[in-house]
Amino acid sequence: MIIKPKILLFVIFVYSYINLHSQFSYPNYFKYPFINQVENHLKIYGTKSWTQFFKKLDSQYLNGNEKINIMHFGGSHIQADIWSNKMRTNFQNTLPHNQSGRGFIFPFRLINSNGSSSVKSSHIGRWKGFRNSVNSHSGPFGLLGARAELIDSFSVIKVWNDHSLNSCESFNSLTVFYKDSSNSYDVNVLVDSGNTFSTSRQRESITFSFEKTIDSIAIEVKKNKSTVSNFSFFGLLLDNDCKGITYHSIGVNGASVKSYLRGEDFTHQLALIKPDLVILSIGINDAYEENFNDEYFYSSYDSLINKIRSVNPQVAILLTTNNDSYYKREYPNQRALQVQKKMYELAENKDLAVWDMFEVMGGLNSIRNWEKNNLAKKDLIHLTAKGYNLIGDLLFEALMKSYLKHKKPHD
């Protein structure tokens, strides 16, 4: 066997850097023997899109010349941005020059809900919140599935990074996603006089490009006409000129697969980001619906995947199975097994990948072990911060295993 020296040195470098310099910590399988480490890998069906994604990682790791977008969808597991932030930290700190912009955010304080601890916000003016996961809440909905509707005629939203570990989270590009039903509102930014900017308007979004990078921003929304109009705010995209990996967290409490199908502006807003990898951690809320039907679950997921691929047909898509959980804290929710089965069917039929979180956790009733070790909450559905961080490390390890397998030297 003749090993290509450049590839071999690269693989050695990846292992060495992850071990010595990154903030990634390998899961402690000895401390948590109930974790099924044998199952901690990706099952990839149809390798074309994944080969393309891994080649883009190659180019970024070797040359630092790529802008890679990873988007992680889910419900409450993702809205709090603990699991996704752990993934973001791991991706952006495993190798040099991986750090890039913060990506898509939603200031959940606008709708009196929880959000990321690394992005803070405040506001003046009254807003009303709507979520795609609440049947009685009306749209329109966009990419995220949460929206804030302005009640007053004037508001200022302030957003800033808090204790950032990423020197590239400063931004010089800000896109505001919104819908103004009668074109009656002005959207502007308030910045220091020494920082000039240009403005570009697209359909139901506006992008501000700044001469200098900034760490915080104030966005002014002001009604300029007396006509009746509804102003809906969908979120922000913070970006900069740094090459690297941007990890977008897209989560709404209570969201199911059908929730994301309610987004009439979903594909339009997704196209402005055009992800290279989409991770879909949706299914836990579906499995708690009393009228859960696995065939309907499959068809809904199929529709969502088609929406994502309409934006980027070559996107790599990863499904993560449900975590083990209890139904109403009374007995194990065996619908997780139905979700698991349908996700494998989807992966095989549509050339996706699966990370079997259910099996990695330890299978049916394993949530009890997680709760005993302060990794899961007493509701036996959600994890603790410690648990979400562990899940983030487990998933990242599984992804790196597949990536390094792709990099394995050949004859």
Image (spheres, rainbow, N blue to C red):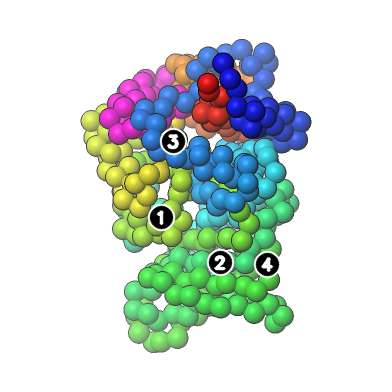
State whether residue 270 appears in this view: yes
Disc 4 to disc 1, how far (Cα)? 24 Å
Q: Measuring from the top left, give residue 55's x and y in whole percent.
A: 50, 39
Q: Which residues are magenta?
A: 331-357
Secondary structure of the residue carrying numbered label 2: strand
- Which mark sits nearer the N-terminus, 1 or 2? 2
**What residue does disc 1 label?**
270
Disc tally is 4
Secondary structure of the residue carrying numbered label 1: helix
Identify the residue at image location x=41%, y=87%. 225
Q: Measuring from the top left, give residue 198's x and y in whole percent.
A: 56, 78
Q: Is residue 376 magenta?
A: no
**What residue does disc 2 label?**
174
Q: Is residue 339 magenta?
A: yes
Q: Amino acid at mark 2?
A: Leu
Identify the residue at image location x=70%, y=44%. 96
Disc 3 to disc 4, how far (Cα)? 33 Å
- Which mark sits nearer the N-terminus, 3 or 4? 3
**What residue does disc 4 label?**
213
Q: Amino acid at mark 3?
A: Trp
Q: Nearer the viewer, residue 253 or 354?
A: 354
Q: Amino acid at mark 4?
A: Thr
Disc 1 to disc 2, how far (Cα)? 15 Å
Magenta: main secondary structure equals helix
